[in-house]
Image (spheres, helix red, strand yellow):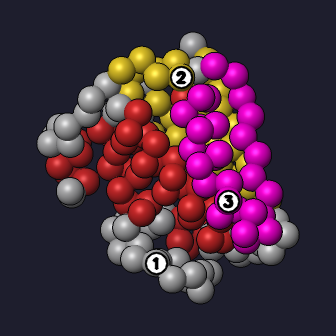
Amino acid sequence: MSRRGAQEGSLVLDRSDTDLFQLSSETAERLRPQFEAADVTLSASGAPAVASVDPARIGQVLTNLLGNALGHAATNGAVTMITKKDSEGVTVIIADDGDGIAAADLSRVFDRFYRGTTTSRAGTGIGLAIARDIVDAHGGEIAATSDGPGTGATFTVRLP
């Protein structure tokens, strides 16, 4: 699916009122064995936060972001996921303490097949592009921030 395809509505969504904190917690628990095997601490916190989303698609976004964070987290490091609701929607924040993202890469991390200059991790470079397409199809936003190599990265998903 191209970025344009997601924006034009070609991505079929099966929306329902979904508690994103519960979905985030369930996703974290499903992936917890991988984090434990890699000696990376995973924590999920927040409060109930209901939004009209396709839970399978948003679960895919969370899985991609958590897998990405795990792949870049420091040895004996930590990944945190926080779910918040406010008057404008729901925000899920996933942060790791690992590789970080170079400033020159931040604007391209969601480009299909792009692999940043600070990574040695194997991958295809499509996970973040897929996450962006799914979030876009929901009318939401996804962003990445980092203070640079070695400082970790934070990914923020905002859904109406």
Residue assigned mark 3: 33
> Furthest residue to the right?
76
Circle nearer the N terminus (3, 2): 2
Mark 2–mark 1 CB contact (< 8 Å): no
Q: Label 2 amino acid? A: Asp
Of labels 3 and 2, the one closer to you: 3
> Which residue occupies 39% across, 77% down?
124
Mark 1 vs mark 3: in front: 3
Element marked by disc 2: strand
Q: Residue furthest top?
A: 87
Q: Quadrant of the N terminus?
A: bottom left
Amino acid carrying label 1: it is Gly
Quarter holding residue 31:
bottom right
Up/down of 64 relative to 7, above or below: below
Q: Secondary structure at mark 3?
A: helix
Q: Which residue position is annotated with label 1?
A: 123
**Magenta span:** 21-48
Q: Secondary structure at mark 1?
A: loop
